[in-house]
Amino acid sequence: MMLVNLGCGKTYHTGWKNYDFVAPDENVIQHDLLTGVPLPDGVVDVVYHSHVLEHFSREAGVTFLKECYRVLKRGGIIRIAVPDLENICRAYLASVDEVRSGRENSQYDHQWMIIELIDQLVRSSDGGEMAGYWKKKSLPNKEFIYQRLGQEFARYRAYIEQAQIYDHVQPLPTWRQKFRAFLAGCKVEDIQYIDFRSKGEIHRWMYDEVSLTILLKDLGFQDIKVCEFAKSNIQDWADYQLEIRDGVILKPDSLIIEARKP
């Protein structure tokens, strides 16, 4: 079987063909996924990508999913994980209700949910408001954020506490950025903004169960269903530990959807 993990980062299994824009090591093939999937038609049994689709514009996301459809065999499976817009919105509304009810310290959860909902769409520098919040010395709602984001937050916060780095510092411009600003006759902050927004860090679109299901159906996929982290029609899914590692869910804020190419 040919199993393909697109935009894998450092979360991959060596039994798969792993691709990303930047290869972190020799087990990952470097490729610009905006130009397509570098495989022939109808040769892949499984296509998987986790927290990748939201980094493409809506139009580019459609093109990317068409490429996934193209490389799949008939009967092949696609499994997609994205931040769950519905879940985030419901958690935000719940936090508003908690503040109004007078629950102690609920304002911290409410503040976080605004950041989780908006920051990765609008940020203009590395980490954005999210990194600034995570670097606060006093963080009374650590457990709430961990429940929302899992290991991503736990690892980052552990590093901050161990290194005692609590202040969020904006990155200084590089000499290249200063030189480009000089040539363009603009502020160096403008060049920094352009450079950042052209990177893959920001979210350019968001999905919920309804919108992603409709999109997959429009592209020709069938048997579309929401899945749990530990369950899949992919053979031996749990053994690959792409979403659960050592019993811990890696990205608990995810919406997981599987579908088949007819």
Image: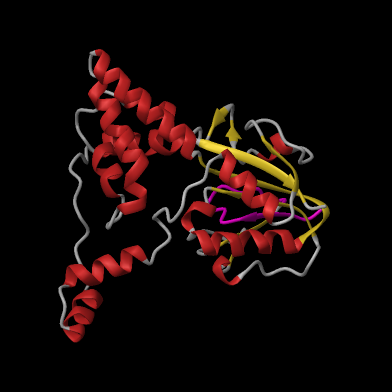
Q: Which residues are magenta?
A: 1-15
Q: Nearer the viewer, residue 204 or 135?
A: 204
Q: Nearer the viewer, residue 11 or 45?
A: 45
User: Horizontal and vertical percent for residue 231?
Assistant: 70, 31
- Residue at figure coordinates x 66%, y 51% from the top left: 216
Q: Any magenta on residue 245?
A: no
162 over 144 or under it: above or below:
below
Residue 103 shows in the view: no
Q: Is residue 3 left or right of residue 112?
A: right
Label tally:
0
- Residue at figure coordinates x 21%, y 35% from the top left: 136
User: Horizontal and vertical percent for residue 211?
Assistant: 57, 45
Q: Nearer the viewer, residue 115 or 210?
A: 210
- Residue at figure coordinates x 30%, y 69% from the top left: 194
Q: In the orientation shown, which residue stands out farthest toward the bottom?
A: 183
- Residue at figure coordinates x 16%, y 78% from the top left: 186
Dominant SS of magenta comes to: loop
Q: Nearer the viewer, residue 26 or 53?
A: 53
Q: Is residue 81 left or right of residue 180?
A: right
Residue 230 shows in the view: yes
